[in-house]
Image: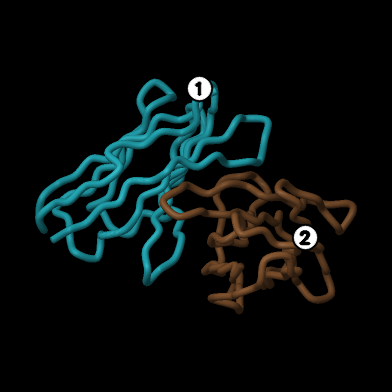
Chain colours: A cyan, B brown
């Protein structure tokens, strides 16, 4: 079946602009995660959605970052007023409710110029 | 501080040679432990996981890992490396046991020479 998909695969934006990154999880997966992978910080957890529960936002680095998950499926990560330090690969993962295995998408490479 | 350590940033092995990638964690209790592989331009793929029980776990692609509580380690091994194993390998832990998030090590890049 289809895996986790993310769009766009690459995004170049100017400093100060807002960006939206999209994640389509595997159908039926109730949990969805966002991670950030950067040279300086490695792989960092950003946010976690589980069903209808309030998301765990403990990894969001600043209030410029937000995410939503509509209808328990697609998720959008929004970065407002982008900064150069936001340049990274943003990975999305999803998980079935009965499993501990997270399935990762290919990521969105964000470059802030 | 609680952490996951992968001491080797970069390892080079010859095709056919054995491989061991190190991972140590520093948490009070034994977390759930994972190894992921990331090929260039790809997302992460789960190789294997340990929750409890038998301390030697088998994974995909011929990989195995051994959990050693006394050493707080979860090292990844493969008896004979193939050129296609060249990738970056990440050790990860779930300290909550609720699958709420993973904490990753910094990764080990594996290069395979022919």
Chain identity of mark 2: B
| Residue with the most extreme bottom position | B7
x and y percent of residue B13 in the render?
65, 73
Q: Quadrant of residue A98 in the image?
A: top right
Residue A82, image x, y percentages:
17, 55
In what element is the residue under mark 2?
strand
Marks 2 and 1 on same chain: no
**Quarter of the image where one finds residue A68:** top left
- Image coords of residue A108 (percent x, y): 32, 46
Residue that lies at the very extreme toward the front in this rendered image: B114
Q: Residue at x 27, y 39 (%)?
A: A8
- Locate the C terminus of chain B and report the quarter of the image it occupies: bottom right
Q: Nearer the viewer, mark 2 or mark 1?
A: 2
The spot of residue B107 in percent (x, y) is 54, 67
Which image quarter holds the N terminus of chain B?
bottom right
B20 displayed left or right of B94: right
Residue at figure coordinates x 86%, y 58% from the top left: B55
Q: Residue at x 54, y 62 (%)?
A: B88
Checking the image for residue B57, the label placed there is none
> Which is more toward the observer, A71 or B80?
B80
Q: Chain of mark 1?
A: A
Q: Residue at x 55, y 39 (%)?
A: A103
Q: Nearer the viewer, residue A66 or A92?
A: A92
Q: Secondary structure at mark 1?
A: loop
Q: Residue A59 sits in which quadrant?
A: bottom left
Q: Is residue B37 above or below residue A54?
A: below
Q: CA distance from mark 2 to mark 1?
A: 30 Å
Q: Mark 2 — residue?
A: B65
Q: Residues within 10 Å of mark 1 (few under 14, many from 20)?
A: some
Q: Which residue is mark 1?
A: A27
In this picture, is A71 found above or below B33?
above
Residue B81 in the figure: left or right of residue A12? right
């Amino acid at each position: 079946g289809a895996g986790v998909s993310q769009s766009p695969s690459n995004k170049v934006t100017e400093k100060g602009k807002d960006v939206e990154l999209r994640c389509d999880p595997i159908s039926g997966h109730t949990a969805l995660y966002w991670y950030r992978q950067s040279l300086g910080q490695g792989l960092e957890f950003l946010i976690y959605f589980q069903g209808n529960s309030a998301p765990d936002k403990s990894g969001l680095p600043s209030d410029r970052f937000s995410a939503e998950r509509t209808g328990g499926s697609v998720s959008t990560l929004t970065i407002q007023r982008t900064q150069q330090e936001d340049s990274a690969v943003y990975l999305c993962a999803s998980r079935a409710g009965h499993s501990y295995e997270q399935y990762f998408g290919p990521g969105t490479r964000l470059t802030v110029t | 501080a609680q952490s996951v350590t992968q001491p080797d940033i970069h390892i080079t092995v010859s095709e056919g040679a054995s491989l061991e990638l190190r991972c140590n964690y520093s948490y009070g209790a034994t977390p759930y432990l994972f190894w992921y592989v990331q090929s260039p331009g790809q997302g992460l793929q789960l190789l294997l996981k340990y929750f409890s029980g038998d301390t030697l776990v088998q994974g995909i692609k011929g990989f195995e890992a051994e959990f050693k509580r006394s050493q707080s380690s979860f090292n990844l091994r493969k008896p004979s490396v193939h050129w296609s194993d060249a990738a970056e390998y990440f050790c990860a832990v779930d300290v909550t046991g609720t699958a709420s998030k993973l904490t990753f090590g910094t990764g080990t890049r594996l290069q395979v020479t022919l």
